[in-house]
Each structure stands twice: as structure tokens, then as C-alpha cells.
Amino acid sequence: MRSRAQLRQFVRFPYQLYASYPAWVAPLERDRYTLLDQRRNPFFQHATAQLWLALHGTSPVGTIAAYVDHLAPAAQRGCFGCFECVDDLAVAQALLDTAAAWVQAHGAPSLRGPFNFAADNDCGVLLDAYDQPPTLMTTYNPPYYPALLAQSGFVKETDWYAYTIDPQLLGMTHPDTLPPRLARAVALARQRSRVTLRPINLRHFRQEFAHAQAIYNQAWAANEGFVPMTDAEVAQLAYRLRPFLTADLIYFAEDAGKPVGMSIALPDLHQVLHPLRGRLLPFGWWRVLRWRRHVDTLRFFAMGVLPAYRRQGIEALFYAETLQAALRHGYRRAELSLVVESNLSMRHSAEAFGAQIAKTYRIYARPCGRAP
């Protein structure tokens, strides 16, 4: 793109494209600009990127970002994101072929995505549940995207799942009670593991997020295409989330005082943003400030334990503590997302007490230089 006017078209295009999709949650426009600003988004400290805007005359019909992440494994550095397109195969192919040629010129052997400059959030193409709004930091797209990608030569690389957890359906009607299956899992975990759980200490916020970063970078290291979070990225994320954190919804598992696992649950702020259509003015600020009145859903945003502590049932301890606290705070539903399909331990742990797959997100890939 060559001008500020074109950048504005890039930013504003999704708001036009999704005008007829009531389930879409519009991001705040200012957040879109921050995401794309290479001076303000710390992701670009380790990535090189380029944006493209597809026009029909002077009207935008598609957008795409291509980037090479220099911290990613060499075979998986070429990615695309911010892919939005009208239902037109020629437009989709032009965008995707352009992105593939660009990452190939920058040394990447394949093009993967979509990732909106993130490894395991704001990523993937939604394959189902198009009638349901996405939860915080997850994506939404028109139902024709999978076909456009398949016809453009892309194939499945991996799927990620969102699990829904309804305490009432599980028989958890009071914070002091646990569903029978979860209660059994908790009892078994306490026999198998010597870890103890404690809530985050928000008075030592920076130190606690440093613990979370260390656990994340070790626990997720084996995931496909994993990229460790840098100090700057963690600092920015912590700054964004700080006003919405509740101490007893975030837990560390410790062994003799050493953090070995974590669970971070966040309020689904998309329930606040949904009616705003991307604008805080004139009255959106008031809704955001009173967000607790509008949110009844919790998202398990990140949960993991160090490899040496797996298969001890620690996840069940996290679920139990968090769901009990969530009910005390008035939450009525939770989503566990995103869980990669290959993480069988996490999936079995969730499914064992009744969590159900509600949505599927797919990452696609295509070798550079190969077109349909």
C-alpha cells in the first residue's frame, strides 16, 4: 500500500464486508491501526511484513498481509493474515498468490495461515458455528472462506478447537459443588500430583506475567509452528488485559514454590464490543467501563503445564478452581480455546468432564510457487 488513504481502506474493509453478518464482532478501529503499525506492535521486532489491498475500481474487495517471522522454524516462517475477501475466487487467488510470491522472495518455502500476527490466538479459518459470535481474541469469517482457500491450492495443516463448558449442563449449579466427573478427576489429580494452586498476585503484576511467559514458552514449545512470546509482546498484552483481570480466575500450579503450570481465564469482552461495531464514540466508552454488566462468558485463554508435570491431572485442578470462582462472579458459561488437535492430553482432560467441541478453526498451507 502506498498511502494513508489506502491504509484506511485496508482497516475499514472488514466493517463493510461483515455488515450482513450479525455474529461478527467488530474490533475497535484504533486496535486495528495498532495491530498494523510496525512501530507500535512489538511483533514486528522479529517479523517483516507487507500489506496488500485489492481494488475493483476504487472500491476495496479484499485485503491480505504477508509476513516472515524470523523466530519461527525455518520451514514455517512464511505466513499470511488479515485475509478478507468478497466471494470471488479470482480476487482470493490474486491476494494469496501475491502473498506467496512475497514470502518466497523473502526465503520462505511455504505460505501458512491465516494468523493475525499471533501464533495461537486470532488465527485460523472458522469452519462451523457461523451463527455464534467469536469470543475474545478469536476470529470469525464468512462461510465461503474454506472453499476459496481450497480452490486456491491450500490444504489443511492443522485444526484448532474451541470447547464450550456449561456448568449448569454439567450439573454444577452452585460454586461449592463440582460435577461428579470433574470431582473424580480432581480427587485423582490430588493423589497423583504434589503441586498446589494459588491465584495470581496482582500486586506483583510484572513478576507474575514473567512467570506466565516462562511457562508459556516451555509448555507450548512442541506445538506446530510455535513462536515464543518476547518480553515486549508479553508487556503489551499484559497492559491491554490488566484492567479486566480478576485474581481468582488466574492460577499458577507450583511445586515447592516453583511455578510449573498456569491457567488464565478472561472475561469475554466481545460481549461488550459486539454492539459497538468498532466505535467507542459516542457512548461505547460507557459500555466498556461498565463491562461487568454485559459479560456472562469466560474464556480459558491459556492453560498449560511444563512437560515434566503432564499426565498428573493438573488441568482438572485448574478447571475446578476457575469454574467455582466464575460462578461466584456471575459467569454462566466458559469457552476453552484454542486447543490444537494434536494436544490429546488437554483434549482428553476437557472431554473427560463434559466439555464439548463447539467450533473448529483450520490453519491452511501451500508450498510457494504452486498455484491451483
Image (cartoon, rainbow, N blue to C red):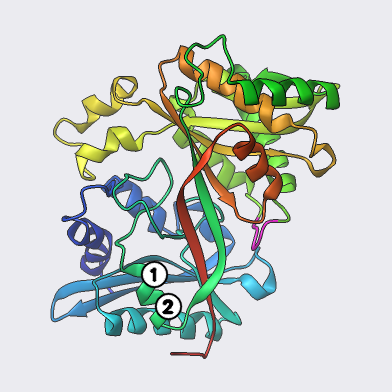
Label 2, label 1: how far apart the Cα atoms are: 6 Å
Q: Residue 243, located in which quarter of the rendered image? A: top left
Where does residue 365 sit, x and y in percent of width and height? 53, 74
Name the residue carrying label 1: 146
Q: Secondary structure at mark 1?
A: helix
Q: Which residues are magenta?
A: 223-227
Where does residue 289 sit, x and y in percent of width and height? 29, 23
**Label for residue 6?**
none
Image point (38%, 56%), residue name:
128
Where does residue 201 sit, x and y in percent of width and height? 63, 18
Q: Does 32 sit above or below residue 304?
A: below
Using residue 198 as the reference point, say whether residue 243 is left or right of it: left
Image point (65%, 61%), residue name:
224
Q: Amino acid at mark 2?
A: Ala
Q: Are marks 2 and 1 in contact (CB under 8 Å)?
A: yes
Using residue 337 as the reference point, say whether residue 74 is left or right of it: right
Q: Residue 192, located in which quarter of the rendered image? A: top right
